[in-house]
């Protein structure tokens, strides 16, 4: 079969032939494999030519101006889009996630590129032996978790089925072979029953004057296996191993046919589904009913119009296949708009977060809830009132404080059910969402809007607070900020975290993502890498504690409670490490061996210094006030960290001389505006 079977433009055929003549046999086979798969979707000549060049011409050898002149501007643009996407599997998860993001962005701009790249991935998954072994698992995972669900979401069923079957064969080879054998053994009997039913339906509908096409379709293996696993049934209990499709001209005829079939056969009532009235999330429309064949085996019957059939089978590609512009544009736009909205809502996420969000959006089934005004909104199963509020409007989500479901007050975390009427109760204009909502929302849209709120709300204060913490750590390490920022390590640090400038570093310190002390130590010149400040490890002291009324004994202070002069203390003999000093009220004292305690007491020594750790809770802007106050009190900060599990809690280690000084410091910090609590740890 020659190129002219696929490409009608003879000039294109002649130009491409020279590229094919120079290629190897496997490359030629790939070109024609791609053509055969893409032919199903009736893509234009420019797509076929760009696909061939994508396979035949190495990316680095492509001159797009020459391609524009030799073929067309459209061919050059499609090829450029194809080459702009990373298609080679990578062993790095983060790189693979970025590949997925880039691919979806390009595909959302030109759906032809989407179909070509998905088809190319079908070839790769069906020819895994051509790929290095270490890359095969990474690629199969991407196909199973992203590309196959994406194909399903866009109703590209032939591509989806091929991907799912190839993944099934790779991941479960023994089960694949067993299921294939079982299918073949029972196929003849099933086919006979289906043929009898088709003949009866065709005769009845012809007598009624309804133009129709009736045929059987077989369920693909991966779908059968998924049903066996999820529903925990046997192969014999699956109703739609082979379904019958009835295709008619109008929606009215769909329901007429349904009535006729109900009168002709025994029906399983719990298996009826009307996807015409309520389409699936990907736009799929059809009526499903289940009848009993002569051997009492259930058989599914699917009834749909020709328009519905084309979109169900070819999805976004029905844009080119079907001739009725109105119908195809509507479904096409819905599918592509979904992809564009998904990309736009998650543009600020990392590659990994983006991929997770895409998977969440593609895998979830949907329910329908409505506003008090009657507006119906779709949600994934498990969505709650917070998701609902953000779906209505971003500002509604940011201000929501409560909800009514069907007229009853309910918590915001209440899961929505089909048909619920949800009313959102609002708080003050400047209320803002809670970070805890990120743990409970189900929609990527709500999660993205909450994250964006905090990024915009706290970016300036995070920078300001992070900078104050950075400067405090620099002072504690006895190095100037100028020395750190003018050194040769700043560029390497920014590159390590993929950041643009120090403000972004400060922001990450301010949110607790990075440690101020860790960043200072990374930036310190090599000769100053040993910190001079006291760290968290127990420190040895001399002359300030009497052990059994004796001086000169080896002692150290327990880092769990960090005692200070003025505290009641107890000594514990640690084998080979001297005496460890604990506070009497330290929780760890109760767990120690009573036989190894020894009397200890404080010995006055004005030159001694000690560590104390406090917990401060308050709003983010208090950080600068705290560091300024401590500097004014001449209290040295040993470390200043944000609790990553609770960003409003700050753990500060101080260098002091007594518990009296600590108590005065705590009282001063309590007086700072927006500090809610201060406790010794």
Image: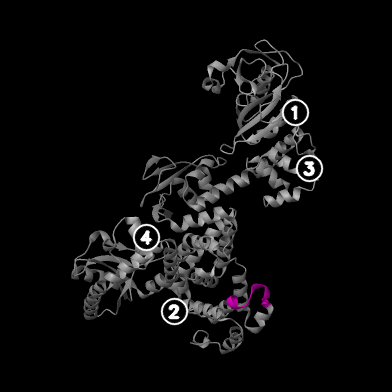
Residue indicated by mark 3: 526
For label 4, the SS is helix
Within 10 angstroms of label 1, few (less than 14), some, or many (20 or more) residues?
few
Inter-mark Cα distance, 4 to 3: 58 Å
Question: Looking at this rendering, what residue extends furthest in the front direction?
Answer: 576
* Residue 563 point in image, percent of width and height: 64, 20
Front of the two marks 1 and 4: 4
Query: As rendered, which of 503 and 461 lies closer to the eye?
Result: 503
Identify the disc placed on residue 631.
1
Inter-mark Cα distance, 3 to 1: 27 Å
Q: Is residue 547 above or below residue 526?
A: above
Inter-mark Cα distance, 1 to 4: 64 Å
Residue indicated by mark 4: 226
Magenta stretch: helix, strand or loop mostly: helix
Q: Which residues are magenta?
A: 53-64
Q: Which callout, 1 or 4, points at the residue further toward the start of the chain?
A: 4
Is residue 581 among the parts visible in the rendering? yes
Q: Which callout, 3 or 2, points at the residue further toward the start of the chain?
A: 2
């Amino acid at each position: 079969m020659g190129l002219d079977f696929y490409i009608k433009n003879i000039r294109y055929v002649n130009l491409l032939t020279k590229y094919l003549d120079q290629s190897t046999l496997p490359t030629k086979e790939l070109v024609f494999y791609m053509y055969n798969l893409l032919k199903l979707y009736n893509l234009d000549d420019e797509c076929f030519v760009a696909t061939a060049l994508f396979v035949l011409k190495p990316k680095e050898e492509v001159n797009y101006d020459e391609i524009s002149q030799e073929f067309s501007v459209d061919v050059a643009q499609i090829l450029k889009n194809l080459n702009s996407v990373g298609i080679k599997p990578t062993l790095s998860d983060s790189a693979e996630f970025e590949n997925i993001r880039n691919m979806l962005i390009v595909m959302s701009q030109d759906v032809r590129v989407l179909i070509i790249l998905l088809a190319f991935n079908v070839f790769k998954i069906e020819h895994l032996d051509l790929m290095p072994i270490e890359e095969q698992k990474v690629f199969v995972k991407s196909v199973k978790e992203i590309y196959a669900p994406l194909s399903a979401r866009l109703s590209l069923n032939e591509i989806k089925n091929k991907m799912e079957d190839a993944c099934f064969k790779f991941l479960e080879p023994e089960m694949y072979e067993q299921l294939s054998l079982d299918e073949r053994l029972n196929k003849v009997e099933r086919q006979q029953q289906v043929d009898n039913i088709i003949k009866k339906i065709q005769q009845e509908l012809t007598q009624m004057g309804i133009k129709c096409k009736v045929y059987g379709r077989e369920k693909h293996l991966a779908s059968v296996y998924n049903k066996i696993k999820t529903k925990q049934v046997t192969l014999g209990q699956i109703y739609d191993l082979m379904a019958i499709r009835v295709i008619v001209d109008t929606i009215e005829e769909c329901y007429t046919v349904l009535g006729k079939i109900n009168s002709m056969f025994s029906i399983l009532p719990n298996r009826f589904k009307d996807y015409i009235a309520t389409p699936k999330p990907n736009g799929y429309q059809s009526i499903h009913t289940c009848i009993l064949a002569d051997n009492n085996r259930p058989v599914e019957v699917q009834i749909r119009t020709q328009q519905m059939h084309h979109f169900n089978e070819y999805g976004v590609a029905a844009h080119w296949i079907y001739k009725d512009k109105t119908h195809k544009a509507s479904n096409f736009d819905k599918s592509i708009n979904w992809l564009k909205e998904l990309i736009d809502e998650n543009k600020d996420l990392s590659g990994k977060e983006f991929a997770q969000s895409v998977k969440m959006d593609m895998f979830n089934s949907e329910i329908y809830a409505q506003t008090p005004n009657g507006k119906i909104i779709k949600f994934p199963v498990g969505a709650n009132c917070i998701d609902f509020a953000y779906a209505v409007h971003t500002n509604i989500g940011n201000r929501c404080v409560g909800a009514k479901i069907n007229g009853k007050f309910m918590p915001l975390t209440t899961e929505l059910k089909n048909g619920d009427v949800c009313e959102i109760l609002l708080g003050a204009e400047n209320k803002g969402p809670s970070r805890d909502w990120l743990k409970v929302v189900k929609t990527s849209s709500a999660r993205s809007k909450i994250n964006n709120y905090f990024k915009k709300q706290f970016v300036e204060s995070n920078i300001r607070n992070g900078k104050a913490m950075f400067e405090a750590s620099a002072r504690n390490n006895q190095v100037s900020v100028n020395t750190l920022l003018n050194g040769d390590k700043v560029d390497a640090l920014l590159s390590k975290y993929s950041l643009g400038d120090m403000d972004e570093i400060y922001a990450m310190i301010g949110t607790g993502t990075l440690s101020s002390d860790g960043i200072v130590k990374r930036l310190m010149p090599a000769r100053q890498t040993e910190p001079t400040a006291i760290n968290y490890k127990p420190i040895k002291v001399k002359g300030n504690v009497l052990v059994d009324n004796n001086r000169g004994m080896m002692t150290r202070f327990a880092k769990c409670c960090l005692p200070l002069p003025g505290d009641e203390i107890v000594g514990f003999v640690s084998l080979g490490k001297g005496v460890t000093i604990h506070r009497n009220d330290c929780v760890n004292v109760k767990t120690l061996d009573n036989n190894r305690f020894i009397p200890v007491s404080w010995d006055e020594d004005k030159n001694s210094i000690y560590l104390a750790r406090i917990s401060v809770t308050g709003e983010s802007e208090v950080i600068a006030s705290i560091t300024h106050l401590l500097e004014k009190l001449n209290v040295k900060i040993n470390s200043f960290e944000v609790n990553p599990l609770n960003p409003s809690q700050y753990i500060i280690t101080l260098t002091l001389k007594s518990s009296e000084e600590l108590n005065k410091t705590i009282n001063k910090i309590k007086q700072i505006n927006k500090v809610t609590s201060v406790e010794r740890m």
